[in-house]
Image (spheres, coloured by chain):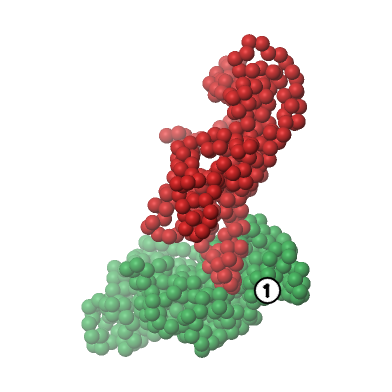
């Protein structure tokens, strides 16, 4: 359990900058997700924290101590890999035991056959077996102890990989897209399980994912990365409802946030204080699917025909074609409310406190807030 | 075209429950005939002839011969030269297999991921495999020459007295084994390089995170176990190739000095084409083929069944 301080990390592969000065502070015992589209540098950052990749510039501190000079094995971290990286020739129990075998036994004691006959070796091996059994029990894979990874399902391999990480008490857990190879149903189950694991272990977790739903549902805080930079760090509520950048707003949340290009008149019509906008050209407004309601189109600032309905049972998504919007506008409604029909034209009424304004570069304009229309 | 046809046709129906019609029967035999004929003429017939010859006292060029049963084999069993030959072949094989496998693995590990020059090195180390061994044997003969050879010259620099490597009973077989290793390790290297490239790099990352303290520990934890199928394959193949040693012996030592480098195939050659005892040579050939058969079956039954676990 340790705090991770990341200070001005840059990394370039060849001529391609992958990380452009990353500053991040992960609190002790915190669950922090690094989320972003593929190629944003999140996995590279995780590998730099782990010590598997060396940064070009910057510094990492673990529990207050600089670790930049330490190789991965001496940083006292554990990592879960995307493809699990289990040793295919070892059984489940042997896989989980590897971190203990490597750290607790001398090179002589690790030798096959003779190793077990050395003094003190029997006790050390017994202690390792006990720890492995305890972890396997916790993860519900005790019955698989003598199987090899090739005989396991994806979910079982995932548990073995978790077991190998938690059999020690590392300073922090690093997870690199651990659920991305699982099917959708199992992914949702494992999401809850990893979150529960974090609550029980009370250890620092750094979790890399491209799936914003994983980040939203599991994290204490989320760092949204794009093009080698961190755009925003905040709680799931903050990045969802109060994004700093249009790219954050668009990346987080499902369905995707609705964006409309709003020049002067439309902004006024939506009740925005346009006088305070330095450059009204390129102003963009965004709102979540649940932040607007359907109203009578006459006199509405935004109106358009319903082109598609998606019924999820608990939610009804209404897709409207609205001229000013960059894509179809999606609204979330209760399916038990009266339903609009495809082809009908409806107006939109957006909750002014949920209307987010961004400038041409995508930066949030917090000074402009909507008034009740 | 063919691929598409195969892909779009749901599993070709093989009617096993229906008796084949006569024209189908004829067509089937007709289609199999060319390959079957070749197998019989090229492989089966010569083998049968050799086995038959081994049961006679036939001598090359002789007009008369008679059936002697297993007498040739009984003679071989009592012949110290034959047993010496088997022992030498086995010693040679053990040395060459261990040497070429070990050296091949070591070179492969060094060449792995060495960037732009790796293909050049790979080609250089692979050259002996493709070179004509008889020609290379002449080169080695010069290198090992007792008075002006390179080997003695270099050893002389560190104060080792010159030796007549190929004419000394204690060094002749080891010298041939060194040449065998030199010739074969490139083959092992290529296979090991292929095997190494198949090991997921994430496993090395995992070994690093799991605290493997040294390169040796990572080798023991990841590389060696994951190369096991390749290693087994290399060992079997180079055993087969080592048993076939003949050209260096023929070019450099002719089985001498004093039978020190007498190996199975050379003994067979000497019996058949120097002493013209064809029946006896055929018996040695049968023993040799039996040994090859055992090794090949090992390869098929053990090695090819072991698909590397991923």
Instruction: Identify the residue shown where x is 63% and y is 31%.
Output: B267
Kindly indicate the quadrant of the structure image that contains residue B88. top right
Name the residue tied to disc 1: A105
Viewer-nearest residue: B124 or A357: B124
Question: What is the drawing colour of chain A?
Answer: green
**In the displayed structure, would residue B199 be above or below residue B275?**
below
**In the displayed structure, would residue B253 be above or below residue B50?**
below
Kindly indicate the quadrant of the structure image that contains residue A128. bottom right
**In the displayed structure, would residue B73 be above or below residue B235?**
above
Viewer-nearest residue: B193 or B5: B193
Q: Residue furthest top?
A: B63
Q: Position of residue A300 (x, y in %)?
A: 31, 76
Instruction: Identify the residue shown where x is 61% and y is 48%.
Output: B95
Q: Position of residue B28 (x, y in %)?
A: 57, 21
Crowd tier of the residue under label 1, counting other residues whose Cα lies within 10 Å: few below 14, some 14–19, many 20 or above: some
**In the displayed structure, would residue B262 be above or below residue A107?**
above
Any idea which chain is the red one in this picture?
B
A262 left or right, relative to B258:
left
Regarding residue A229, the answer to whether it shows in the image is: no
């Amino acid at each position: 359990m340790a705090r991770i301080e990341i200070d001005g990390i840059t990394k370039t592969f060849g001529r391609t900058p992958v990380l452009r000065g990353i500053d991040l502070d992960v609190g002790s015992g915190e669950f922090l997700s690094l989320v972003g589209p593929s190629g944003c540098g999140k996995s590279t950052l995780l590998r730099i924290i782990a010590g598997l990749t060396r940064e070009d510039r910057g510094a990492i501190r673990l529990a207050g101590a600089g670790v930049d000079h330490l190789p991965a094995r001496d940083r006292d971290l554990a990592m879960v890999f995307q493809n699990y990286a289990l040793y295919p020739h070892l059984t489940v129990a042997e896989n989980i035991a590897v971190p203990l075998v490597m750290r607790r036994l001398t090179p002589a004691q690790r030798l096959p056959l003779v190793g077990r006959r050395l003094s003190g070796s029997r006790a050390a091996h017994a202690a390792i077996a006990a720890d492995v059994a305890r972890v396997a029990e916790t993860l519900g894979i005790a019955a698989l102890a003598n199987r090899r990874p090739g005989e396991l399902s994806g979910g079982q391999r995932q548990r073995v990989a978790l077991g190998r990480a938690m059999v020690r008490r590392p300073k922090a857990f690093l997870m690199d897209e651990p659920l991305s190879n699982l099917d959708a149903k199992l992914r949702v189950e494992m999401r809850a399980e990893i979150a529960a694991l974090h609550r029980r272990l009370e250890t620092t977790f750094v979790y890399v994912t491209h799936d914003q739903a994983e980040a939203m549902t599991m994290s204490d805080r989320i760092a949204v990365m794009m093009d080698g930079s961190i755009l925003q760090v905040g709680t799931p509520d903050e990045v969802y409802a109060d994004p700093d950048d249009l790219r954050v707003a668009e990346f987080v949340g499902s369905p995707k946030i609705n964006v409309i290009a709003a020049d002067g008149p439309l902004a006024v019509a939506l009740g925005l204080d346009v006088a305070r906008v330095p450059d009204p050209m390129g102003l963009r407004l965004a709102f979540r699917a649940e932040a607007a309601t359907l109203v009578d189109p006459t006199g509405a600032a935004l109106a358009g025909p319903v082109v598609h309905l998606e019924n999820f049972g608990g939610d009804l998504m209404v897709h409207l074609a609205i001229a000013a919007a960059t894509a179809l506008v999606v609204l979330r409604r209760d399916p038990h409310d009266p339903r609009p029909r495809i082809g009908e034209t409806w107006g939109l009424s957006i909750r002014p406190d949920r209307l987010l304004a961004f400038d041409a570069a995508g930066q949030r304009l917090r000074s402009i807030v909507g008034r009740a229309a | 075209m063919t691929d598409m046809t195969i892909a779009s046709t749901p599993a070709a129906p093989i009617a096993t429950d229906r008796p084949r019609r006569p024209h189908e029967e004829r067509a089937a035999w007709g289609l199999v005939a060319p390959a079957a004929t070749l197998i019989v003429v090229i492989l089966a017939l010569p083998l049968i002839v050799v086995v038959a010859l081994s049961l006679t006292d036939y001598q090359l060029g002789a007009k008369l011969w008679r059936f002697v049963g297993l007498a040739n084999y009984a003679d071989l069993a009592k012949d110290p030269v034959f047993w010496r030959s088997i022992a030498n072949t086995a010693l040679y094989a053990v040395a060459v297999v261990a040497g070429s496998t070990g050296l091949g693995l070591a070179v492969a590990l060094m060449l792995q991921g060495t960037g732009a020059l790796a293909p050049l090195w790979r080609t250089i180390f692979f050259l002996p495999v493709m070179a004509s061994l008889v020609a290379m044997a002449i080169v080695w003969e010069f290198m090992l020459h007792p008075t002006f050879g390179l080997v003695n010259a270099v050893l002389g620099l560190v104060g080792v007295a010159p030796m007549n490597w190929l004419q000394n009973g204690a060094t002749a077989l080891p010298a041939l084994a060194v040449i065998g290793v030199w010739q074969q390790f490139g083959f092992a290297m290529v296979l090991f390089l292929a095997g190494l490239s198949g090991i997921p790099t994430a496993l090395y990352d995992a070994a690093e995170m799991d605290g493997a303290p040294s390169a040796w520990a990572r080798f023991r934890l990841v590389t060696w176990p994951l190369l096991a199928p390749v290693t087994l394959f290399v060992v079997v193949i180079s055993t087969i190739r080592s048993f076939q040693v003949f050209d260096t012996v023929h070019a450099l030592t002719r089985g001498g000095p004093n039978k020190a480098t007498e190996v199975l195939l050379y003994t067979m050659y000497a019996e058949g084409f120097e002493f013209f005892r064809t029946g006896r040579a055929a018996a040695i050939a049968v023993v040799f083929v039996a040994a090859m058969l055992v090794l090949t079956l090992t390869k098929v039954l053990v090695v090819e069944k072991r698909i590397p676990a991923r």
